[in-house]
Image (tube, rainbow, N blue to C red):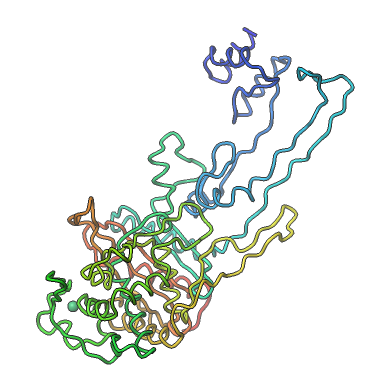
Amino acid sequence: MDKLSKTLSQILEMDYNYVYNRLTTTISSEVTIKKQVEKEKINQLIEYNFDGVYYARDNSRIYPYGDFLSSTLGFTSTDGKGQSGLELYYDKYLSGTDGQILYETDIVGVEIDGGNASYIKATDGLNLKLTIDYDIQRLVETAMSEAMQVHSAKSCQMLVLEPNTGEILAMTTKPSYNLNEIPRDDLDTLNSLSRNRLVSDIFEPGSTFKIITSCANIEEYLKGNSKAYSPTHIFNSSRYRYVDGQRVKCWSNHQNGKHANLNLSGALNNSCNPIFVDIAMSLGKETMYEYIEAFGFGKTTGVDISGEASGMLLPYFAVNNVEIARIGFGQTIAVTGLQLASATAAAINGGNLYTPYLVSEIYDNSGILAQKIYPTLKGKVVSEKASSILSEMLEKVVSEGSGKHAYIEGYRVAGKTGTAQKYENGVIAQGKYVSSFIGYFPANNPKYLALVIIDEPVGEYYGSTVAAPYAKQVFQGIIDLKNIKP
Ligand SMILES: [Zn+2]
């Protein structure tokens, strides 16, 4: 035992005492000394021809695409158990079961000579087919790597989904990590790099949330609610609104006729905050919350990936008027990127809220389909009419308003920009912003919806100039790839 322990500890580069204790103090018939040993070391050991030493073949994972899609795929432990992302969520499908050999033994567990042995076959795990479109994912990975460089951002995230089904076509968080080189011995780094921020992180959306406020207003107007504003109503052009003695102001100074004589469409084009205060206050807390909840805020979307956060929505009974006013333009509420994208999809696809999803089919190892996953319609949030009126307005935001950096000549791109200040310990963090853009095309029959989030860009920070150009870049890429005619 001494010689064996010495040899094993030398070749496997392990502590002698540890190996010796493992070999001598066990009560089981078998002990594992080391996993994931390189082949040349095994070859050295085989030459010693030790009695009772066995080597079992192990599988190692190779990811030919490196850091491609890594925060969505997730990673596994060294023995193959899912730890994050799809690997964790679908672990029970993917992992299969180990085979077993059962021996007849005597009462102390020694195998009986000539006894029966029976085998239980190992079963392979199942295979997943993802909704991810490889080509679009590649466009998105490239765009966000560029954004990281150009804006020296803390993180950049992008999501593309099919608004009529909830299929996630691309999803990335940068910085990312190479799945062949998982930083297992640095847990903080691993946790940070492996986080799928679009699903697990929440942020204050700012102006992109005006899509939801506008949609609620239009639907209520169509229903004949006298508290809703007509699309032709011209709003008060003051920069300020006073709510319960507190002053809420527009980001623009409203000088020299800026933001004057705006209707709802103009308010979206210019992203004029006080107009959304008017809408939220007029609709009131009950109606605002009815829509916010119907669009899925404050709860998880139910996407099939681990680590989903539910966002932060003040409880109904605790919300005061100033908070309702601020929620109208996207403050005092925190959302996940995925929540915002799926809610926006419902607002512009005719009013249907779908559960976003990543796995479309599950196969066994011989290629036989075990399960097909269909889109899940969670509810009808608004009418088709309201949805199409809103979509026309969002198309104008891109063709003539703050979203013009996403405009593509000859194509009907629509969307909304967002620039939100960040908070740290409840106070505004100076100079820290989340710049975002949510957009889709074609506006009259949306097929691709994209969300871009640039977290803490250095220098420029407006969603219109920082985030919108990457949506344009990816949409242009999709147009080229799929040969979509103008
Ligand atoms: Zn304004």
Write the residue at 36% across / 82% down: 395
Residue 444 falls in image quadrant: bottom left
Residue 44 falls in image quadrant: top right
> Foreground: 39 or 133?
133
- Which corner quadrant of the figure contains ligand 1? bottom left
- Residue reaching furthest right? 114
In this picture, is 189 found above or below 252?
above
Write the residue at 37% across / 71% down: 292
Q: Position of residue 415 (x, y in %)?
A: 36, 76
In this picture, is 295 found above or below 113?
below
Left or right of residue 417, residue 73 in this image:
right
Classify the position of the N terminus by image quarter: top right
Left or right of residue 247, residue 326 in this image:
right
How many numbered dots are placed on residues in this image?
A: 0
Write the residue at 68% across / 21% down: 30
Q: Position of residue 188 (x, y in %)?
A: 38, 40
Left or right of residue 452, residue 3 in this image:
right
- Residue reaching furthest front? 317
Left or right of residue 198, residue 16 in this image:
right
Q: Position of residue 48 (x, y in %)?
A: 69, 14
In this picture, is 480 found above or below 227?
above
- Residue reaching furthest left? 256
Q: Position of residue 196 (x, y in %)?
A: 43, 53
